[in-house]
Amino acid sequence: MTANIGIKQEHLTNVAHSLGKILADEFVLYTKTRKAHWCVTGPDFHSKHLFFEAQYTQLEEIVDEVAERVRALGHFPPATLKEFLALTHLTEQSREKNDAAGFIKELLSDHQSILLHLRENIDGYATAFHDAGTSDYITGLMEKHEKMAWMLRAHLE
């Protein structure tokens, strides 16, 4: 059944496609944060293991929320690894060292990349697509990434 929520279908399609790219970024970042949790080594192993767990738990919630936002707009989100890798603008990294600082720098860079992407597109949801709900949702998502990025940055100072 078509979503009849006061937004033109073509706009809903565009928003769902845009959210699919965000979902791909979130899923790739979630996976990279899980890797950090599993693979971190060093004298600060325990504290960083727990830190990365807290971050991937937050990202797991975000992944679910973005996918559900797409569904609320009457579309189906991308849901395969192949689709995520085709849509994301993040890169997978192979690490020679599994040190906490290296993981933190990489994850911080990804959060900042996502933040820039969200900021560049937030106004378009409300103005071009007449979807204030998604614009508001993206504002909240930005705030979550800002806090997670701050937590990562604090480890590097």
Image: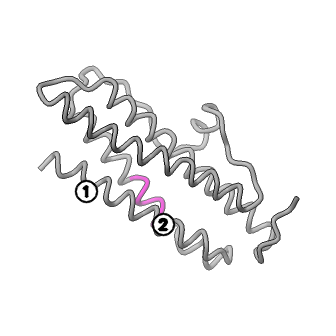
The residue sitting at 43% across, 54% down in the picture is 114
Q: For the residue carrying disc 2, how many other residues have a C-alpha within 10 Å: few (<14), some (14-19), or many (20+)?
A: few
Residue 69 locus on image (x, y percent)? 64, 58
The residue identified by callout 1 is 150
Q: For the residue carrying disc 1, how many other residues have a C-alpha within 10 Å: few (<14), some (14-19), or many (20+)?
A: some
The residue sitting at 34% across, 60% down in the picture is 146
The residue identified by callout 2 is 120
State the quadrant of the N terminus.
Answer: bottom right
Residue 34 locus on image (x, y percent)? 39, 32
Q: Nearer the viewer, residue 128 or 140?
A: 140
Q: Main secondary structure of the magenta part?
A: helix
Quarter assignment of residue 7: bottom right
The residue sitting at 61% across, 56% down in the picture is 19
Q: Which residues are magenta?
A: 113-119
Label 2: element kind: helix
Of circles 2 and 1, the one toward us is 1
The residue sitting at 21% across, 23% down in the picture is 41
| 5 lies above or below 111 | below
Q: Amino acid at mark 2?
A: Glu
Left/right placement of residue 135 relative to residue 98 reads right
Quarter assignment of residue 86: top right
Residue 98 locus on image (x, y percent)? 25, 24
Left/right placement of residue 2 relative to residue 72 reads right
Residue 71: mark in rendering: none
Q: Earlier in the sequence, mark 2 or mark 1?
A: 2
Q: CA distance from mark 2 to mark 1?
A: 20 Å
Label 1: element kind: helix
Q: Nearer the viewer, residue 17 or 53?
A: 53
Residue 48 locus on image (x, y percent)? 22, 35
Considering every residue shown, the one lying at the far right of the view is: 1
Q: Amino acid at mark 1?
A: Trp
Q: Is residue 21 magenta?
A: no
